[in-house]
Image (tube, grey):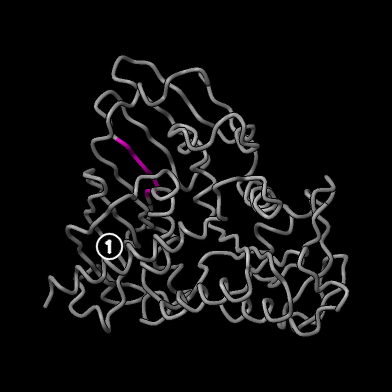
Amino acid sequence: MREVIVVGLGHAWLEFYKATLGALQNAKTVDLLGTVDPAFPVSDAETWHVQDIENIPQEAVRPDVVPIILTADHYHVIEKLAQMGFKKMMCEKPLVSRRTEIEKVQELVARYALKLYAIDFYLPKMLGLRVMRGIVGRGDPRYEWLTISSPEADFGEMLGRIESVGVQVIEAGKFCLPDIAGRPYLAKDKEVGGMVLDLITHVCGPLYQAQLLGRWRVCDASLSRLSDTTSGYLVHVADVRTEVEMYVTALLEADGIPIHLAFGKVPIEKGGLWSLEIRGNKGMYFAGLRTGQPAVLVCNDGRTVTFSLDIPTYELVIREALLYFDVLLPGFDGNYDAFLASMEVGRAILGKYAQKST
């Protein structure tokens, strides 16, 4: 049973992690030692609670104890915990809130020999994609978390040669203007806002984990912003140095395969699209990124295979992180390289658009 500490008792804790950790504690998978949050003098968890990281009880400061970081800002929390002696950490998305922190996190990982599990709840939903691509197989404990309608099928033969890939994370309705009204920095603050920082790991992380981001380049990119933060419409970004991108489209090429990306917030009343599609010369693969519907592989001859997750997303996140910390997932790095690769693609998209617009 792994001992954990929760740092941050806001929305993520109340909405997702409190119930999940409670169920895993009842299953004797984790033991919640305590909680940390400066905004709360007491906690509703049946554990010790402190308001400052520095006040974590000394007996809980051990390399095998896992802090789960759910605060709004993460870099300085990671830094403090590393300085205290914690070695394994889970960190909610986004791993960094500022582009300048990317290299700083890399320095912390190297200096303190940290094992970081970067949480992005879109990535667990791509477990079926990694199975379809042959990256996760029967010997991997995560394979048992899926129901596959025809596990003996030759997935590669059904799909054939990959000819193109598309990923869409398009947030409308409550995910756009009401969300921005609650988090105005997303559209107003160039340092911590913008869709590249907010959504790029949703878009590119699955591609990286499916080994679809090999030798890549950005061929073209287009950026839009909101004309007004709470009631606007999309207009083109004139200056990437000062204006905050809220909707992004890009065309990449990776190992000769075109990859079409569209992500951001669009100010319409309802709707949204969170999906990934792979077109092969013999079939198609479709997956929803946000919702819980199964992924499906459809061959041109009518054969189909579905891939369905059998456990809730946040339970998968915690179980996968614990397997990673116990070195039971060879070749898996806790999504860390997927995060770094996504940030590199984001930088290249912004650079390509800046080059076009000058």
What residue span does the magenta drawing correspond to?
A: 273-278
Q: Quadrant of the C terminus?
A: bottom left
| Residue 123, image x, y percentages | 50, 49
Q: From the viewer's perspective, is 263 left or right of 317?
A: left
Depicted 276 relative to depicted 43: above or below: above
Q: Position of residue 301 (x, y in %)?
A: 30, 14
Taking the magenta stretch, the answer to whether it contains residue 274 is yes
Q: Amino acid at mark 1?
A: Val
Q: Is residue 225 above or below residue 148?
A: below
- Res 185 quadrant in image: bottom left
Magenta portion: prevailing SS class: strand
Query: Quick one: label 1, few (<14), some, or many (20+) residues within 10 Å?
Result: many
Q: Secondary structure at mark 1?
A: strand
Splitting the image into 4 quarters, where does residue 263 fall?
bottom left
- The residue under label 1 is 248
Point 33% across, 39% down: residue? 277
Where residue 163 sits: x, y (%)? 23, 36
The foreground one among 115 and 13 is 115
On screen, residue 324 versus residue 339, left or right, reads: right
Report whether 289 appears left or right of 311.
left
Considering depth in this image, is 253 or 19 the residue closer to the camera?
253
* Residue 84 belongs to magenta span: no
Residue at figure coordinates x 60%, y 33% from the top left: 143
Exactly how many numbered labels are in the figure?
1
Which residue is depicted at the point 38% across and 26% down?
Answer: 156
